[in-house]
Image (cartoon, grey):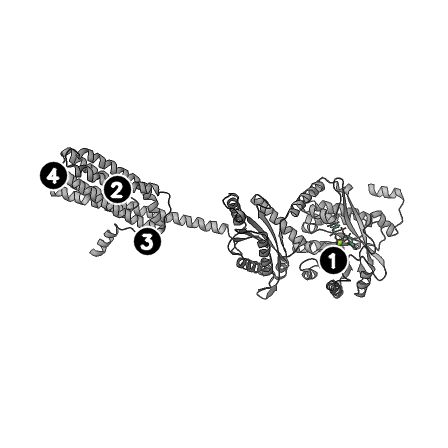
Amino acid sequence: MLPTAFQRFWNLFKVDTEDMTLVRAQYAAFSRQIPLLYFILVTNTLSGIFTFAQQAPAWIAVWVPLAICAVCVVRAVWFIRNRNKTFSDAEVVRLMRVTTKLCGLLTLSFTLWGLFLFQYGDPYARGQMVFFISMNVIGGAVCLMHLRAAAMSVIFIANVPFVAYFLSRPEQTLWALATNLALVSFSMVVVLLTYNRDFAKLVASQTETRRLSDENFRIANLDTLTQLPNRRWFFDTLASLHQRAHSGFFRGEEARLAVGIIDLDGFKPVNDTYGHATGDRLLVEVGKRLQGICGDGISLARLGGDEFAILVTGQVSTDGLKSLGRRIASTLRLPYQIGAAKAQIGSSIGFALYPDNAGTPDMLFERADYALYYAKRHQRGGTVLFSAEHEAQIRDDSSIEQALKAADFERELSVVFQPIVELGSQRVVGMEALARWNSPTLGHVSPGIFIPAAERIGLIVTLTRTLLRKALAEAALWPEEVRLSFNLSAYDLSSSESVISILAAINGSRVAPARIDLEITETAVSQDAEAARAAVDTFKALGVGISLDDFGTGFSSLSHLHSLPLDKLKIDRSFVTDICTNPASFKIVKSLTALCADMGLTCIVEGVETGEQLELLSSLGATFVQGYYFAKPMSGEATRAYLGVVAEPEEPTILRLQS
Ligand code: C2E
Ligand code: MG
Ligand code: MG
């Protein structure tokens, strides 16, 4: 019992190192106050020297205290100089122990000095000595409040000898003084211990608050599905890395920074076919594979959906980025086994470099996004680094967008028509409407350019409505047996507003819905499969036919054949161009025509330019063809002449247009 109580009491004089966070907080608090303590000690001692210099021998009245003061000054200077330095845990513990020991030693020196001098002084001087000791003890206890062991040493080492000395004296005043000193010391110990406990609790609660806020920060920056850093983290990190590279501290390759955006090709069909749970697991697996590739100097994040991003720092070179892109693409292309489902996807990557391509973080991201957009359109599955040509392209794009915004669609847009021919009978069974734009500022602009531009700036719905009205007005003049094919963009399928606008145009025309085919592309379907499916169902309900255009150029062609109620399939002209010279193209067209026959779909082969191609196609059993061999796209008037439409008398036409 006694030894444990004594042990506990003894422990109050030791530096407790169990909780290092607390120890560090204690060190931070007392190291700021300790120069002040030395200041109190030195001024106190100097006033003692002043009082006793005439009453006691010089060595004890002056030289000894000056020597102790010198030690105090050295320590104070050390603490002031090192106040902003960061120490390791071991160093902090060592400093606390050294300080505790030194404080004990200094207190002992001052106490012995005081006791020794006590005999020399007159009553005033003795009174001052008691004041000196009390001040030192109070100053020590207050300034060392956070370093309990040192404060305890100061209180005990200073007071016990004095109390004992005063009690041993015959003067009753000194007994009263001794009792007073003992009681005040006891109170100080109580205050000290209470304060220490409260300080420990405060630090613990601050640590918990910090832990919670760290945890909140972690969660706020984490993508819950893949456990990768998220979009917020990515943009924050991009900003700080850019700041670092921009600071001018890093030189050459070190000062470069690359942003890479990775977009999965063919992820949506996996989601649509196997369900969202499988899609989610696929994304987790993609995250893991990407993590496996990202080494030092590469940070990875998921931006959302099937889009990931990387930040490359350190030795950034264009060759390095290209090979990194190739590694990513080949790793992500390997098959995925998710439960019973086996999936295969691809990925396209766009990179932009700081400072080569952009100066600000936002711009850098935009440029990487452009490079990705370029890869998706022209180099699917590849890695594209933003270049000077892209820069020029962006300028062109923006001038096209400006002109398109200012365009008078009614006047500047027109439709031309290209016949679709039945091979056996050489009969024209339909006409495909193709958009033309003659801009007063830019001249003729190809639909391959202005249609994506209209999609980007949100004008496609108005554009489609104008073109469809014009095409229907022409088709109303053709023989009943000639159908009209009309191209729709992905955006035309994605909103109910555009679908209603198309239905209204068809219903408001003099062309029966059964004479119309709407051409949709695979990209349109893969962009938003659900919306595309709903739109296609609505069109089918009206009685129009649906053709899948540019077949074979998309990513997951076969899954769309299953999921959509299609009537026709158009084999892309890229397979026909070299059908006579490239055995691969020949085989593709052969199997696609066979596939159409199997599935009961009408097959139209696009881009036939020569008789040789035509012969080969008819040997493969192709039934419907389209291409320059028969006719180039022609104006409404030329189409009417081509179809042998007899011009109607003028008056009724005018009346009809007015009505
Ligand atoms: P598409 O629907 O596949 O149209 C066929 C394209 O191939 C047309 O190009 C046509 O002029 C061209 N073509 C036809 N036969 C031959 C041939 O034998 N040889 C060669 N080299 N080319 C041939 P165009 O008119 O430049 O249209 C390009 C694309 O723009 C179209 O491809 C279509 O995707 C899009 N487009 C055209 N008009 C519209 C429209 O009104 N709305 C929408 N959303 N897209 C349209
Ligand atoms: Mg087409
Ligand atoms: Mg086509």
Q: Picture coordinates of residue 604 (x, y %)?
A: 78, 59
List x then y, in percent, for residue 454.
Answer: 70, 46
Give ligand 3's quarter of the image.
bottom right
Image quarter of residue 112: top left
> With respect to residue 407, does 376 lie above or below?
below
Residue located beneath label 1 in the image? 574
Distance from label 4 to label 3 (Cα)? 46 Å
Are circles 4 and 2 on residues that touch, CB within 8 Å? no
Mark 1 touches mark 4? (CB < 8 Å): no
Which amino acid type is marked by label 2? Val
Please tell me which residue lies in front, 313 or 369.
Answer: 313
Instruction: Single out the mark in the foreground, 2 or 1.
Output: 2
Structural distance between the alpha carbons of marks 4 and 2 = 37 Å
Does residue 461 appear in the picture of this structure? yes
Q: Is residue 526 left or right of residue 48?
A: right
According to the picture, the residue beneath numbered tag 2 turns out to be 71
